């Protein structure tokens, strides 16, 4: 997949562009940070991506790999007081480092998404393909952490409403 090409944008003729009906243009979903609450979610995508490894905020010139799950909000069941429900079809993501520990966190997430405790010999690739389209009820919590300067990060925790417990 390292040589995979990104799809190229199709450049429209100016007259064709100006005459296109806005109702014929695809509406993109919102990419959001959902507030804490209870949601029905589905898995829109699960893929790997490359990223630039940084140390002390500076690029090292090395590339890392991570697994990225893109969640779609099917419905908002409940949110904390003072929070607004999230629009259906809104998207957000969660990433797992391509390391032994990252795979352990990904396994736990996949177990809860699929409601299983045994993957019956499935590979990481099989599980990534298998969770696409899965729906589950989840509780989301948000933890804020301070970065450099005034930067504040919001870290989501996504847990199945009925989490599975591994017997191993």
Image (tube, rainbow, N blue to C red):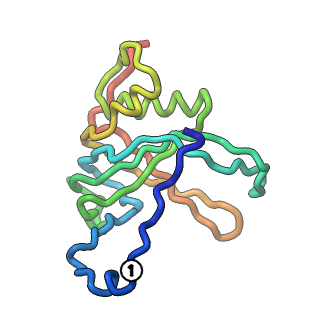
Residue 143 located left or right of residue 121: right
* Residue at point 40%, 50% (across, down): 141
* Image location (x, y in percent) of residue 94: 46, 47
- In this rendering, the answer to whether 76 lies above or below 138 is below
Where residue 51 sits in the image (x, y, percent)? 63, 49
Identified at 53% across, 29% down, the residue is 103
The image shows residue 24 at horizontal and vertical percentages of 22, 73
* Residue placed most toward the observer, 34 or 118: 118
Q: Kindly state the secondary structure of the residue where label 1 is placed.
A: loop
Q: Which residue is mark 1?
A: 13
Q: Nearer the viewer, residue 22 or 102?
A: 22
Above or below, comparing residue 72 to residue 150 in the picture: above
Quadrant of the drawing holding the C terminus: top left
* Direction from residue 66 to residue 141 in the image, left or right: left
Is 73 drawn above or below residue 129 in the view shown?
A: below
Q: Residue at x 61, y 40 (%)?
A: 65
Q: Quadrant of residue 28?
A: bottom left
């Amino acid at each position: 997949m390292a040589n995979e090409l990104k799809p190229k944008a199709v450049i429209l003729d100016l007259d064709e562009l100006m005459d296109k009906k806005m109702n014929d243009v695809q509406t993109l979903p919102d990419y959001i940070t959902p507030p804490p609450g209870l949601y029905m979610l589905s898995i829109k995508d699960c893929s790997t991506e490359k990223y630039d490894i940084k140390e002390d905020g500076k690029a090292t010139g090395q590339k890392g790999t991570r697994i990225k799950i893109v969640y779609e909000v099917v419905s908002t069941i409940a949110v904390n007081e003072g929070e607004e429900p999230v629009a259906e079809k809104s998207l957000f993501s969660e990433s797992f480092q391509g390391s032994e520990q990252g795979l352990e966190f990904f396994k736990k997430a996949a177990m809860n998404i699929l409601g299983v405790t045994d993957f019956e010999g499935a590979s990481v690739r099989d599980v990534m393909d298998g969770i696409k389209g899965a729906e589950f009820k989840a509780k989301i919590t948000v933890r804020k952490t301070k970065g450099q300067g005034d930067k504040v990060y919001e870290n989501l925790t996504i847990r199945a409403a009925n989490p599975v417990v591994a017997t191993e």
